[in-house]
Image: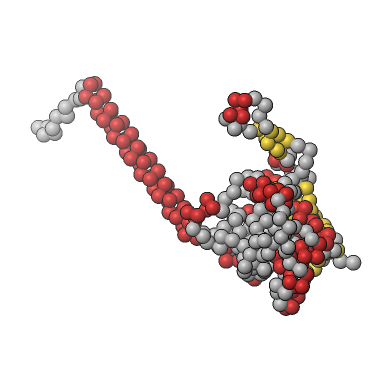
Amino acid sequence: MNDKPKVKKLSNEQIAVRKRFIGATFVSCMVVGLVGGTIHVLQLGANKMQQMRDLAGYDLVKEKDRIRAAGQDLYLADRHEKGRTGDVSYTIEEAKALLTPVQWEMLAEMVSVPDGPFVMGTDSLKSDSQNRPQHSVSVPSYKIDRYPVTNAEYAIFVASSGYRPPIHWVKGKIPEGLNLHPVTMVSWFDAKAYADWAGKRLPTEAEWEKAARGTDGRRWPWGEMMDSSKLNTYYNTGSTTEVGAFPEGVSPYGAMDMSGNVQEWVANDFIPYAESTAPSDLFAAKVPQIPTNAKDRSLRMVEFVETEERYKVMRGGSWKSDPFSTSTYHRNFSWPNFASDFYGFRTVKNID
């Protein structure tokens, strides 16, 4: 006797219904999983953004007051120069009195960099294309300022030469507390004028990079890993700091502030490295072209066109920079007549 229960055979319609149910259940699970995953990713992103806000050295609500439109600094500097009121800055004696003899002696220090080859640039595909490829460069020995040029040093220059002071100085005087901060609001031409007056010169790109990273190809002056405690960049203070305030960020040759604080002008035009695969238009200096028809003018449409001019290279990143722009091999660039509150420089001289 067979006691097995009889299995009822499903009709084709019932099978089709069950297949649709199973398919719908599968799709629903997939959708729930995707939505849940998306929510999780968004939450992780929100948490990361909050961590970045917490790390920032200033209130990001006030960031709008720190951001200026491209070219606005140039406009302000041009207006400043044309509208000079004849305000007297410092006498030489007043400028010398800004610091103690010990401080002046400290600022006069230069470090020696021996001749020979070093690793310049990078092959990292995560880096901006203008930084590639990595290659070996040899430079003669030279001396480079241990610190970026400070407001106090620039005041001596202004007092001795009659050169116009930076736009943010109040009636020709350094804002209170900034004597030992790097001078800012200086164009490439201002930096070169100072270097000529001091009997020195702006460093070449290769000289600057070798002084910053040594010969082992390190990414930052102290090594391979980003460490925000060793430099003044976006996550720290929200302004310039006194030179040498981050002694653990010292370069292999003893130069300070070569990552962060102020982005530094160097002598070179912004051109590609040999064997560079970066797009050529990246290196072409561009200017806005005024629209020729009324419609485009009414819409404020602007087209940027290439010129025969060249940008100048800037190195080191700044207090405003994205931290990875402070790497020793990163090349930034700007018009040589631009000045901003994170542009500075240091000088070099040949070793006879």
Residue positioned most to the right: 352
Residue displayed at 76% across by 68% down: 91
Q: From this viewpoint, which residue is outermost toward the top?
A: 12
Name the foreground residue: 197 vs 174. Answer: 174
Task: Tell me, yes or no, if residue 88 can be seen here.
Answer: yes
Residue found 60% across the figure and 45% down from its top: 69
Where is residue 223? Give x, y as percent: 65, 63
Residue at (73% x, 67% y) in the render: 90
Q: Is residue 46 above or below residue 105?
A: above
Position of residue 38 relative to residue 66, above or below, is above
Say which of 140 and 117 sits in front: 140
| Residue 191 sits above or below residue 286 on the image | below
Quadrant of residue 120 in the image? bottom right
**How many numbered tags mark residues here?**
0
User: Colour scheme used in the picture?
Assistant: secondary structure
Which of the pair 122/80 is nearer the observer?
A: 80
Using the image as rendered, state which of residue 36 and residue 285 is in the foreground: 285
Residue 308 x/y as whole percent: 79, 38
> Is residue 333 in view from this perspective?
no
Work out which quarter of the rendered image holds the N terminus and state it. Answer: top left
Residue 92 in percent (x, y) is at: 78, 70
Residue at horizontal 67 percent and vertical 68 percent from the top: 179
Question: Where residue 139 sits in the image (x, y, percent)?
Answer: 83, 58
Query: Which of the image's four quarters has the C terminus?
Result: bottom right
